[in-house]
Image: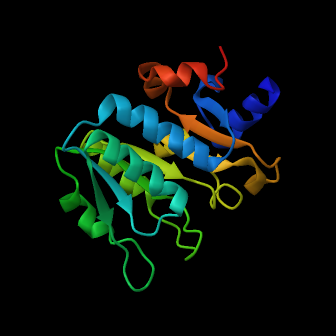
Amino acid sequence: YEGVRDKVQAFVNAASRKEIIFTKGATESINLVASSFCEKYVSEGDEIIVSEMEHHSNIVPWQIAAERRNAKIVKLPFNDTGLLEIEKLPKLISSKTKLIAVNHVSNVLGTINPIAEIIELAHNHNVAVLIDGAQASAHLKIDVQELDVDFYAFSAHKVYGPNGVGVLYGKERWLEEMPPYQEIGRAS
């Protein structure tokens, strides 16, 4: 189990094995962030930006979290060619924006999103980012340190691992600040 954690750490180039959390799937990883992050950092009137090209598993957890916290979902649209309208993102981000959720690669369109640009823009506004990497993990090199992403989720079966196993990468600073993470699948 811990040997696999080390392999996953190397696979995504995490700084620490403590940043790797095992779940039941990418969906559970996203749900875990949506519930714990939003519980601590999202208040009434805050906003979560979600792209319109997301898989259901990267929409519903944010809708539930927003409803629970009386927050708002803001949609990042995509155009007729299947590309995110990234030029609209700076105007969508406000002082109330707490997190942006977007996929690395669309499961329907095959679009490879400019996540490095999204992450940089978000961080310039002190906004966290969750990337759904389920479709990207088998096809693209993932370097969470280079991307400087806050959370990155994917499923083991997409990279020829067992069914029913998900991986959540989370920057150690977030994991230390969100108590529920300390109890779920973390190395000590």
* Residue 28: image location, x then y, percent: 60, 43
* Residue 48: image location, x then y, percent: 31, 50
Q: What residue do we see at 18% from left, 61% from top?
A: 91
Along the line of sight, which residue is nearer the eye, 34 or 134? Answer: 34
Q: What residue do we see at 44% from left, 37% from top?
A: 35
* Residue 100: image location, x then y, percent: 36, 50
Looking at the image, the residue that sits furthest to the top is 188
Q: Is residue 143 visible?
A: no
Looking at the image, the residue that sits furthest to the bottom is 80
Q: Is residue 34 visible?
A: yes
Q: Is residue 52 above or below residue 93?
A: below
Identify the image's colour scheme: rainbow, by chain, secondary structure or one colour: rainbow
Q: Quarter of the image for the N terminus: give it.
A: top right
- What count of labels does the image hold? 0
* Residue 106: image location, x then y, percent: 54, 68
Q: Is residue 96 above or below residue 22?
A: below
Along the line of sight, which residue is nearer the eye, 172 or 31? Answer: 31
Q: Quarter of the image for the C terminus: give it.
A: top right
Along the line of sight, which residue is nearer the eye, 87 or 161? Answer: 161
Q: Is residue 120 above or below residue 18?
A: below
* Image-based side of 115 in relation to 72, left or right: right
* Image-based side of 11 in relation to 103, left or right: right
Q: What residue do we see at 44% from left, 41% from top?
A: 34
